[in-house]
Image (spheres, rainbow, N blue to C red):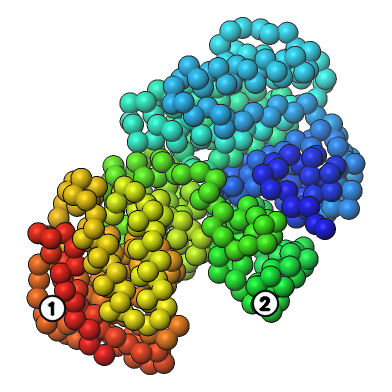
Amino acid sequence: MVNYPIGIQTFSEIRNNDFLYIDKTKYIYEITHPGKYVFLSRPRRFGKSLLTSTFEAYFSGRKDLFKGLAIEKLEKEWTEYPVLHFTLAMAKMGTVEDLFNQINNQLARMERMFGVERDGDDITTRFYNLVTNLYGKTSKQVVVLIDEYDAPLLTVLHDPERLELMRTALQSFYSPLKDLDPYLRFVFITGITKFSQLSIFSQLNNLNNISMLPQYAAMCGITIKELEDNFQEGIGMLAEKYNYSHQQVIDKLLYHYDGYHFSEDSEGVLNPFSLLSAMNNRKFDNYWFSTGTPTFLVNMMRKFHTDLTKIDGSTAMQEDFDAPTENMHNVLPLFYQSGYLTIKDYNPRSGMYTLGYPNEEVKVGLMRILIPFYVQSDPVPASNACWDISEALLDDDIDKALTAARSYFASIPYQENTLKDAPTTEGHFTAMLYVMFSFLNRYVYSQVRNAKGRLDILIKTDTTIYVMELKLDGDLDKALRQIDEKDYTIPYQSDGRKVIKVAINFSTKERTIKKWKIEK
């Protein structure tokens, strides 16, 4: 039986206890020869901490842990360096005092571990003196690894005043790095988001950001080849449980967990935590969102008054989404860097990227957490209604699906209805329906462009394509005419599936779907 390392982020534990390890060590060698200052951003639960731990084992000279791996043939010297491994994962209380306590505790542990006497009280002095004393004691350069560097910042990202305090505090910790250059062999900094080097890392202007370099796109995550080479036993067990063929299991895994692209011409990778969980549990499920609710994301969506229906399929230049998070003017950088959007397409002529949800797990999981903000504070009734709507859509019964949606909206108590606090607009109503329809169906699109306008909602099932135009206290016949006049159905007429036009009228007075009209 394969041992899957669920939640295990320590390289030595994985190797010593015979857990499955996907060999990424060639990247370790490539990055460190001749790399010195390296930054990498990747989404949550994507293997950043394991990668950091692997660097620690490598620079500690633990050749025994790398037996049979790619780097064993590449590295000839296996020099042991003193390694300082920091993590800011626990500094999430949103106060400078908590941040300093976390850093000071780790500095104290390292001082004890290396037998270096504490010299000074502030973190800047302690960090600087720890490195220089280690160099003097061992005559070897020091390796500095910083995991989840941005965890304290994400907690206060929506609060400019507290963000500035936290940023200044972190700068005092990172500031010695440039002056320590002669004493450092390698510096690796990783986290979810990208903050500007000037504001966080002081004058460390030689920090190499490899986050969007194609040669490192698969360093975190699992490629299709790695899936087929390392997970045959798990694939076989899933096939037996679900009565699927080998290829059907692979297709299902890709549908749920694949689709992440970190540069314009890179291969896609699967979310490692979700894939390992599916193999371990022998079940297709939404695992990524079960490990944490992205509160910071919801806070920023509110701050920027984000139109949810325009997120999927967004187009942007690289500097618009791979941008310093503290300077962003919309949620695209946060959505991309956090893993809720990924690169879907690239136009080399214009330099424009198309961004979209990576896979089923991300889209459905995101809709789950957004239900309290767009529909109703209690997600249980909404989940039940979504099931009813989804079942009706799978049965090609759009009338039944809209009946279920109307009944659900009408049943929401006034005090729990998001419309009482939101602008009563067609856009908000569209977002509500989009969340409901998307809950269990990946093939739901909103604000679909063509040459003449934007289609409100497009739903694709295995047999039918629904073209929907929504009106607020409007005219259904006018909505149907708009579908025809703007040629919304033309791109789908050669698809082979039935194309059905749907006009929906939402009543602001009754706060639910008033009526609809279906035309085949």
On residue 212, the disc is none
Q: Quadrant of the N terminus?
A: bottom right
Number of the label disc, if any, that sits on residue 476: 1
The image shows residue 308 at horizontal and vertical percentages of 32, 57
Which quadrant of the view contains residue 199? top left
Identify which residue, 14 or 341, lies in the foreground: 14
Q: SS of the residue at dot 1?
A: helix
> How many discs appear?
2
Q: Kindly tell me whether residue 299 is visible in this rendering.
A: yes
Q: Label 2 neighbourhood size at 10 Å, few (<14), some (14-19), many (20+)?
A: few
Q: Earlier in the sequence, mark 2 or mark 1?
A: 2
Q: Amino acid at mark 1?
A: Leu
* C-alpha gap between disc 2 and disc 1: 45 Å
Residue with the mark numbered 2 = 243
Where 256 sits versus 46, above or below?
below
Q: Quarter holding the C terminus?
A: bottom left
- Does residue 486 appear left or right of residue 30 in this picture? left
